[in-house]
Amino acid sequence: MAGRPSRQRIVEIAGSRWRIQRARLRNAYGLCDYASRTIKLDSRLAGSELLDTLIHELIHARWPDLSEDAVIEFANLLTHVLTLEGYQRAD
């Protein structure tokens, strides 16, 4: 559609190109698909919930063997610190 901002971004994670897509998801805030190197984020997320989910999925992409508990702990910490420091989404 003309005039709509891209819902996909390309980033490099550990030497590989990954897509980050926003889409309406069911039963998840975010997904990390190693086979397609795609991170999907629910398009309804905003604010610190979006930031936490993005960080969470980026950690999964970079360190796939990290336990879920460690991913959650580190994502929550980063979200908290970045929010305290005033980082926020700028569209």
Image: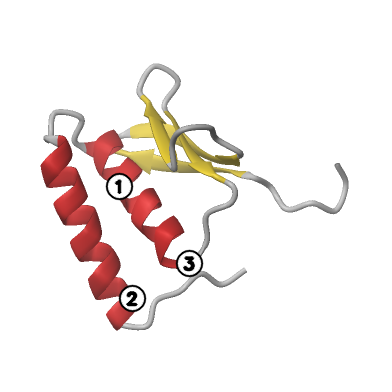
Mark on residue 47?
Answer: 3
Kindly identify the residue that appears in the image at 43 percent across and 36 percent down.
28
Residue 74 to residue 15: above or below: below
**Residue located farthest toward the front when viewing the structure as drawn:** 27
Q: How far apart are marks 3 and 2 (CA)?
A: 9 Å
Q: Please identify the quadrant where the N terminus is shown.
A: top right
Quarter of the image holding residue 16? top left
**Dividing the picture into quarters, in which one does residue 52 lie?**
bottom left
Amino acid at circle 1: His
Where is residue 51? Give x, y as percent. 40, 60
Label located before the other in sequence (3 or 2): 3
Left or right: where 70 falls relative to 43: left
Residue at mark 2 to residue at mark 1: CA–CA distance = 15 Å
Sequence-wise, the earlier of marks 3 and 1 is: 3
Compared to residue 82, the image places residue 13 above or below, namely above
Regarding residue 14, the answer to whether it shows in the image is no
Label 3, label 1: how far apart the Cα atoms are: 14 Å
To which residue does mark 2 refer? 83
In the foreground, 54 or 5: 54
Which residue is denoted by mark 1 in the rendering?
A: 56
**Residue found farthest to the right:** 2
Residue at horizontal 39 percent and vertical 50 percent from the top: 54
In this picture, residue 85 sits left or right of residue 30 = left
